[in-house]
Image: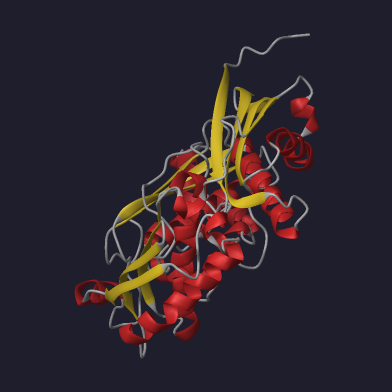
């Protein structure tokens, strides 16, 4: 049998649970966003949350029809407490004493200078900020995500389901996972190491926890053909983990941008998503770049693809569009980039319309990744324009290459 000369390497990605302090902050910020969009689909929101032992601070800028900052100061504390309870926090032993927490709302109005750049007199929408955004897709998993981040999310979603159901009653909300996969070239060939740390009730039997979590959570999530040579599974490797959540670690919106995207398998522009309405291209254009990358892969034009977009504040169109298929493309990248430009209107207003980004559905995105997920909320995961993209590729003149 011939041996491959492809280089072998290890790639690791992590995920964090809905109860991790940074993800709690993301969910609160997106809850505020959804709250405002439910009242005014054209609301403008840039909301950050800081959460720590016994306190929550909500800050940022907002704008909307009939919006009252005083009303928000009255309404948002109840919304925050409801979200914390839904995650699984309650008393101090859970990691956050919800009823006793001090909740400060320090929102202000959006700058008029920004507002005039975003909402043009002719009705068109300009980019709410400058920046660069990346989208990525690969055929290595059904989710069109790299295997390490897909598995890291999968493990934590299963852990959360068993916690919420009461099947593993000692579990508490805070958790982190980490998955290391061995690749040969661009192909995953072996699972190397799974790391999972989960918060648990005081007095839990640690050995029982490790055995049950391995059997009930980790093993059902692993593709057996990649685990047949044995895989290291480290559950609560450091020992007891009873003090977790915001009681143990401060959380802040936007600190888990690699968890939110592709686990480090492609570049990241640096902008966070949660708490931002869709005029902020940090969010909407990152969704659009993923949408385009999925079309490229689903159309059979590449095994994997990275799409970069860039905008200037107030711009009505991207200042640059680039498609990189990493040597896996069925056609040359310059040709594919031109076909993408012809197929997709990537102006801020068009992205908002086609991906339906004015309705309140962003809380659903705020934990377990913004990509590779099913459901009506995740419009950027659907690929209705594959035939149009293929037709645009066929129209390109040879000299584009």
Q: Quadrant of residue 226?
A: top right
The answer to whether residue 289 is seen in the rendering is: no
Q: State the residue lying farthest toward the left.
A: 113
Viewer-proximal residue among 161 and 378: 161
Q: From this view, report whether residue 101 is shown above or below residue 218.
A: below
Viewer-proximal residue among 144 and 56: 56
Q: From this view, report whether residue 187 is shown above or below residue 274.
A: above
Residue 48 screen position, x and y as percent: 36, 63
Counting every numbered tag in the picture gives 0
Viewer-proximal residue among 71 and 312: 71
Viewer-proximal residue among 69 and 223: 69
The answer to whether residue 399 is seen in the rendering is: yes
Q: From this view, report whether residue 268 is shown above or below residue 234.
A: below
Q: From this view, report whether residue 106 is shown above or below residue 268.
A: below
Residue 233 screen position, x and y as percent: 68, 28
Residue 125 screen position, x and y as percent: 35, 73
Image side of residue 357 versus residue 375, left or right: left
């Amino acid at each position: 049998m011939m041996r491959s000369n492809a280089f072998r390497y290890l790639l690791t990605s992590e995920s964090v649970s809905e109860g991790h302090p940074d993800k709690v902050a993301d969910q609160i910020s997106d809850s505020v966003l959804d709250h405002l969009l439910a009242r005014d689909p054209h609301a403008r929101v840039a909301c950050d949350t800081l959460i720590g032992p016994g306190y929550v601070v909500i800050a940022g800028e907002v704008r909307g029809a009939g919006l009252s900052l005083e009303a928000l100061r009255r309404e948002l504390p109840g919304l925050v407490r409801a979200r914390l309870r839904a995650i699984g926090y309650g008393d101090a032993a859970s990691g956050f004493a919800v009823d006793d927490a001090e909740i400060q709302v320090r929102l202000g109005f959006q700058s008029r200078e920004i507002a005039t750049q975003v909402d043009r007199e002719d009705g068109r929408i300009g980019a709410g900020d400058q920046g660069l955004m990346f989208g990525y897709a690969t055929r290595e998993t059904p989710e069109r995500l790299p295997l390490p981040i897909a598995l890291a999310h999968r493990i934590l979603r299963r852990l959360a389901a068993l916690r919420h159901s009461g099947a593993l009653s000692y579990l508490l909300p805070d958790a982190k996972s980490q998955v290391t996969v061995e690749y040969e070239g661009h192909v995953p060939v072996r699972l190397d190491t799974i790391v999972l740390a989960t918060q648990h009730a005081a007095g839990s039997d640690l050995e029982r926890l490790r055995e049950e979590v391995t059997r009930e959570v980790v093993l059902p999530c692993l593709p057996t053909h990649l685990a047949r040579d044995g895989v290291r599974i480290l559950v609560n490797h450091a020992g007891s983990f009873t003090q977790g959540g915001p009681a143990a670690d401060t959380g802040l919106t936007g600190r888990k941008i690699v968890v939110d995207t592709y686990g480090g398998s492609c570049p990241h522009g640096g902008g966070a998503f949660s708490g931002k309405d869709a005029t902020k291209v940090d969010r909407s254009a990152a969704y659009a770049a993923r949408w385009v990358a999925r079309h490229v892969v689903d159309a059979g034009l590449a095994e994997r693809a990275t799409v970069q977009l860039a905008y200037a504040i107030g711009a009505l169109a991207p200042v640059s569009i680039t498609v990189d298929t990493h040597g896996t493309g069925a056609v040359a990248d310059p040709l594919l980039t031109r076909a993408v430009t012809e197929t997709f209107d990537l102006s801020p207003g068009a992205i908002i319309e086609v991906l339906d980004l004015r309705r309140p559905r962003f809380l659903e995105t705020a934990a377990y990744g913004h990509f590779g997920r099913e459901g009506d909320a995740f419009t950027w995961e659907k690929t209705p324009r594959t035939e149009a993209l293929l037709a645009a590729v066929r129209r390109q003149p040879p000299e584009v290459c």
